[in-house]
Amino acid sequence: MASDRPPHYDILFEPVRIGSKTAKNRFYQVPHCNGGGYRDPSAVSEMRRTKAEGGWGVIFTEQTEIHHSSEITPFIEQRLWDDRDIPALAGMAEAMKSHGALAGIQLAYSGVNGPNLYTREVPLAVTGGPILTFTSDPVQARAVDLADIADIRRWFKNAARRAKAAGFDVLCLYGAHGFGIFQHFLSPATNQRGDEYGGSLFNRARFLREVIADIREVTKDDMAITLRLSLHEPGPAGLGNDELREFIATHPTLPDAWDLAQGTWEACSGTSRFTAEGAQEELVRGIKALTPLPVVGVGRFTSADAMVRQVKSNILDFIGAARPSIADPFLPKKIEEGRFEEIRECIGCNICVTGDMTGAISRCTQNTAFMEEWRKGWHPERARPKGKSNGPVLVIGGGPAGLEAAMQLGRRGYKVALAEASRQLGGRVASERLLPGLSAWGRVADYRIGQIGQMPHVETYLESQLTVQDVLAFEPQHVVIATGARWRADVVSRYHLLPIAMDKAMPIFTPDDLMAGRGPHGGRVLVYDDDHFYMGSVLAELLVARGCEVDFVTPAPVVAEWTKNTLEQVRIQRRVLELGMAVHTSKAPATIGGTSVSIACVYTGREQELAVSAVVLVSSRTSNETLFRGLAGMDLQSAGIASLRRIGDAEAPGPIAWATYAGRRYAEELDEEPLGDALPFRREITAFDPAQDHQTG
Ligand code: ADP
Ligand code: SF4
C-alpha cells in the first residue's frame, strides 16, 4: 500500500507469529467489555468489524463465560454456555476476520469473582469464601474438589470446541485483573489449598498446565492460545511481579503468547488523571528475556513513537490496546498511512468503562460511533451523504457538542458556520483541560478543531456572541444551539431540591468561577459536592494547590461516588485524604451563615458547625437557553429558517460524552425523515421460544 509514513514506523507493521497463526501487524486489540455483550450481539459484532476495517492485526471479544456455573451478573459479557451461543459468536468471528485480522475469543471462568445472581448456581472457587467483586454480594463460593476440577477442565474443553466451531483463530485464557480462575489458582491470596493444586508455584500452576493440554487436544494446531495474566497483584499475599516472572521463566512456552496487564482492572485501566501513557513499562520490562513467545502489553498507547519505542527496546512484541482502539478503531490504518494528525486520541476518561459498570451499553467521549455502528449505522470515520438542504447550517457554540456537530455536518458535505462567543473553541474542555489532572480532556477539542480546519466549507467565527437578531441577519437554513450550561450558585442538585438559607456575607463560588481564576487563594474553604463525578475533587485539589485548607462535604457515603464506575473512586478518595482535606461524607449544608456553615448528617439530621471563609458549590448546572428561547418564540419559517434545535448541555447538562453524542446525532439526522414514535435505533429481542428443550452441556 502506498504510504506516507516514515520507515521508522515500519516495525509496527511486521507480521508476528502466535503459535500456528500469524498476525499481520503488531496492533492487538486486547479483550474489552462494551456493556452490550450477549444482549447486543449484532451491535458488538459491528463494533468489532470497524476495528478490522481500521487495520488491527488481532481482535478479541470481551470475556466469554464458558459455563453457567460461573457468571458475573449484573455485568453483561459474552456467553458460550451451550451450542446455541455459537451462531452469534460465529458472526463476531466473521466480522473480526473481514479485513485479515486474527479473531480471538477470551474464555473466562470467574470462580470467586462470579456471584451467579442469574443462574442461581452455587459458585465454585479455588478456595471458598465471599465473592470478590464490585457489588459486595452477600454470597459465598464453595471450594472445588477434585471432581469439580475435572468438570471445569471439561467445560474449558467444550468451550474451546465451540470457539473453534465459531471460527476463532485465537483463544485467550483469562487470568488477570483478579477476575479469572487461572489467576485464582496461581495467586497465594486466593489459593490456600493443601492438595496438589495448592502450595508451591508449580502446584498452583497445575490447573493451568492441565487446561492448556486439554485444549490443545481439541484445537490441535488450528487455534493459538494466549494467556492473559496480571503483571502484579497487589496485597501481601498477591501474585507479585517477581513470582509472575518466575512462573513465566518456568513455563516459557506454555501458551503461544503472553498477554500481560497491570494488576487490578483499576490499575490496568487507570484514567489519565492518575495514570500516564505506558504506565506498566517497569512491570513488563525484561519479561521477553524469559520466554521465546511474543509478549503483549497495554498502556493506553496513542502515540506511534511510544509504540515503536516499546518494540525497539524489546519490551513488547504486540501493542495491546483497548481504549485507544475504542476511541479510534482506525489507529493502525492512520499510522500505516502516515496520517498521524488524524488520530482521535483516547482521553483516558473511562466513560466507556461506565457502560459496563452500569449494565448500559458503552459509549465513548471521543468516538461517537462506538456501539452505534449497528444500532444506528454510524461509522467512526465516515458520515452518511448530505441531505437535501443546501443553505448554511449555523452551529452556535464551539464546545464538544457544537464542535462535533460542525465536524460531522462538514463530513456530510453541508455548508457550516460555527459561531463561538469566546476567543477560543472548546467550550467546557477549554477550561477543564487546565484543571489538575485533566489536560487530556483538551484532545476532545484539538481533534475536532484539526478536522474542521481542513474543511473549507466549515467556517469558524470566534468572539461572536450571537443574539436573536444576529441569527436572523445571518439567514441560515438550519440553526443548532450548543451554547452549553453554567454551574448553579446554590445547593440545588440531588440532595437539596430547593435552595437553603445563605447569608450574603459568605463568599460563594461555582466551578465556573474557579476555572476563570476567581475564588479563594487561601483560608479555610468548604467544598460541597452533590455532583459526585470528578469536578468536586478536582476543584478541591486546585484549592489545596492555591494554599487553602479544604473541608470536603458530600451527602454520599464516599467521595465522588459515581466514579466507582470510572474505576477512580478509591484513588480519588485516597488523593483527597493524602492532601490533608477534612472529609465529611453523608453530610450536607443545612444553612450557610456569614462565617460558618452548618452541615447536617443525612441520616440523623444532627448538625455540626464548620467555620470557613468561603464556600465552593459543586451542585448542578443550568442550560444557557436564552438564545434558544428567543428564537423558539419567533416565526422562523417566514425568516427562512427551516429548523431550530438545541443540543448538548444547552438542552440538558451531562458528561462531555453526552455532548459529543448529541452533536453527532444532530448531524446524522439533519434532513432525515422524522421517525415519529418509532424507536430511533435497532435492537435485538431475546427469542421467545417456550417449547425449547434443555441443551446438554
Ligand atoms: P457543550 O458541552 O454542550 O458543548 P459547552 O458549555 O462546552 O457546551 O460549550 C458551549 C459553548 O457555547 C461555549 O464555548 C460558549 O462560549 C458558547 N456560547 C454560549 N452562548 C453563545 C452565544 N450566544 N453565541 C455563541 N456562542 C455561545
Ligand atoms: Fe478513551 Fe474515554 Fe473513549 Fe474510553 S470513553 S475510549 S477512556 S476517550
Image: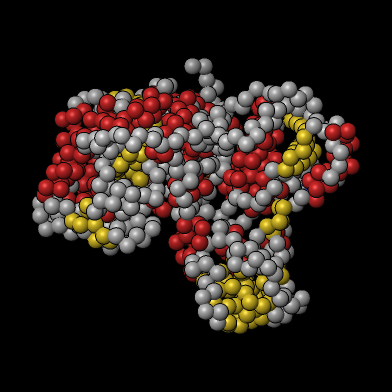
Q: In which image quadrant can residue 166 be found?
A: top left
Does residue 319 appear in the picture of this structure? no
Q: Could you tell me which quadrant the C terminus lies in? A: top left
Using the image, determine if residue 16 lies above or below residue 664. above
| Side of 206 where 632 appears, left or right | right
Where residue 320 sits in the image (x, y, percent)? 40, 37
Using the image, determine if residue 307 lies above or below residue 355. above
Determine the residue positioned at 67% across, 31% down: 674
Q: In which image quadrant can residue 406 be found?
A: top right
Where residue 227 sits in the image (x, y, percent)? 27, 40
Using the image, determine if residue 573 lies above or below residue 65. below
Does residue 570 appear in the picture of this structure? yes
Determine the residue positioned at 50% across, 30% down: 374
| Side of 362 where 545 appears, left or right | right
| 178 or 392: nearer the viewer | 392
| Side of 306 where 181 appears, left or right | left
Where residue 124 sits in the image (x, y, percent)? 22, 52
